[in-house]
Image (cartoon, rainbow, N blue to C red):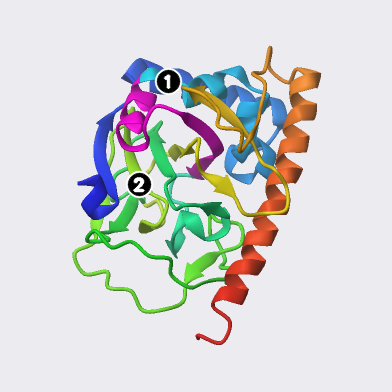
Amino acid sequence: DYREHGFVFPVPALTPAEAAANMRHIERLEARIGVTLGKAHKKYRSGSYTFLPWVEALCRHPRVLDAVEDVLGPDILVYWATFFVKEANSPAFTAWHQDATYFGLEPYEHVTAWIALTDASREAGCMEVVSAHGKPRQYHHENSRLENSINAAGQTIVEPIDASGSVMMELKAGEMSLHHTLCVHRSAPNKANHRRIGYGVSYVPAHVRAMGPNKPAAMLVRGKNHGNFDLLPSPRAEFDPAAVAAGEKFFANFMGNYADAERRHAEQFAGTR
């Protein structure tokens, strides 16, 4: 199914107790930084595994990695990871897009494990996906700065896509989905009376390379590194100064490569719209 369609779900990941424990960690983090996670600086939503051990442990969860290994092989790194938060009755959404667009990685082999920490039903704005029918390709995107988009740039596909037969990837808390980096997906606003929170971890096989100007850093979670990434150290404690410094450097480096990937994507599709 994954090879044919570009996605698979539901996959057992966390127990209900583990999902609830992670939600308590999120609430404790929100109390510390004084803002809900969805409104927090991107370093808390997307880079926190570099300085929060409980987030790193979520990336390293054995049941998650066992499923990821089935599609990527034994040598696995975390390239990026983000908490996706929709508050109860929130207008937050994501437009049709592909994860690969601005990651600047080759070949197109990374997989995102989307781990539901709360129920992600159709009502709550779960992910909606379109099958690649065994022929995934990169679509033309633009940064549309869409209001209420969870993706900060509001990136969206700007060429026709066939969304007939799209699938709603509904998940219970503790379940996860896997989707390929070229999987076309979106999500609607949360019309439920509870928060919809998931953690999307972008895992890459160690032979993947970054095309940007900076050698990227990544976290080795299984197997061995192939030398294409500098390895991030594990945080010794929450907000450990050395881990925070490493996280700041990692974040700046990542955003530099991200900006380069945006530029190259625009050049690739210049004049096609």
Closer to the chain start, of discs 1 and 2, is: 1
Tell me the CA gap for discs 1 and 2. 18 Å
Q: Is residue 72 above or below residue 209?
A: above
Q: On the picture, is 28 further left or further right than 65?
A: right
Query: Residue at 28% across / 34% down in the picture?
Result: 172
Q: Is residue 37 above or below residue 104?
A: above
164 or 94: nearer the viewer = 164
Q: Which x, y percent locates residue 88? A: 44, 45
Secondary structure type for disc 1? loop
Residue carrying label 2: 179
Q: Which x, y percent locates residue 218? A: 61, 33
Q: Is residue 101 among what the camera can see?
A: yes
Query: Residue at 55% across / 56% down in the picture?
Result: 151
Q: On the picture, is 272 further left or further right than 50?
A: left
Specify few, some or many for label 2: CA neighbours under 10 Å numbering under 14, 14-19, or 20 or more: many
Q: On the picture, is 102 further left or further right than 127?
A: right
Q: Which amino acid, by three-letter code, is at mark 1?
A: His
Residue range in magenta is 63-85
Query: Residue at 38% across / 65% down in the picture?
Result: 137
Secondary structure type for disc 2? strand
Residue carrying label 1: 61
Query: Residue at 51% across / 43% down in the picture?
Result: 208
83 or 263: nearer the viewer = 263
